[in-house]
Amino acid sequence: MVLTERDKHIIRAVYDYRVLRQDQVQALFFGSSSAAQRRLALLYHHGYLERQFLLVHTGFMTSPTVYLLDRRGEELLRVEFGLDEVHWKSSHNQVSYDFLDHALAINDFRIAVTVASRQPGYELLDWHSEAEIKQDYDRVNIQTAKGRNRNVAVVPDSYFALSTPYGNTHFLLELDRGTMTTKRFRTKVEAYMAYYRSGGYEKRYGARSLRMLTVTLSQRRLENLKAVTEEAGGTRWFWFGVLSELTPNAVFGESVWQVAGQEGCAPLIAAT
């Protein structure tokens, strides 16, 4: 197999995203599913990528294919990209379906942002995954309903920064699949507010601007989390969207987001 530059960047993307479905690789690098399938099959058979199949009720053979890094891919990252520290080992490919569901949903949103950032005037400046943040995370003190102090970790699912025609902007991301209680979500909201007000956010990310994005899987869940956020005192910092609506064409400029403390919908990046 002769590796192309695109092959090398596919391997790098699988490492950066941790796991990618075939259709996600296609969205990032290909114009057709058949071309993506051919190259991914070659990368798998030559030991650059590992592949697994997501089980669905219609049976194994129709299950979506997901790709993870494999041994030769790790070696390529060191040689071609100069990554002295590749945080990967074969045991990382032994993942649960809950992990895959969560990671792939985050990656759906990340890919929408990445593709949308290719339009003139936009640039994705930075993206830190949950795994990166967990290596060195912050903690804050919040007050419980009973008036007691509680020390909690601040570990968003991702942080990212954008350059837009209207200036740079910064975001923390929570990807909600409905597995978290609203009580726990409220604690997260209170922790993010305390984190910002304490100066911890500015110290960590070197920015004062912040929007906390919560991406959910349904409109009803969105409404519940928005109400919980408003009850906790969260306002215009907190934005909410439904994952299926946050396509590359819509994620920045269309009114597909809702904001705590406000009625109606708004675009994430509005002309100013």
Image (tube, rainbow, N blue to C red):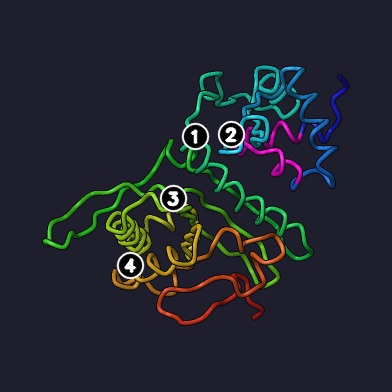
Residue 228, disc = 4
Q: Which residues are magenta?
A: 9-26
**225 lies above or below 74:** below
Tell me the amino acid under the disc marked 2.
Leu
Q: Which quadrant of the rendered structure holds the N terminus?
A: top right
Viewed as shown, does residue 240 lie left or right of 48? left
- Distance in Å between CA atoms under marks 1 and 2: 8 Å
Could you tell which of marks 1 and 3 lies nearer the N-terminus?
1
Q: Give the amino acid at mark 3.
A: Pro
Q: Position of residue 22 (x, y in %)?
A: 71, 38
- Name the mark nearer the viewer: 4 or 1: 1
Going by the image, does 180 lie left or right of 262?
left
Q: Which residue is mark 3?
A: 156
**Which residue: 44% across, 50% down?**
156
Which mark, by number, is residue 40?
Answer: none
* Residue bearing the label numbered 2: 54
Residue at disc 3, secondary structure: loop
Q: Position of residue 247 (x, y in %)?
A: 67, 60
- Mark 3 or mark 2: name the one nearer the start of the chain: 2
Mark 1 residue type: Tyr
- Mark 4 lies on a secondary structure that is helix
- For marks 4 and 2, give the one nearer the viewer: 2
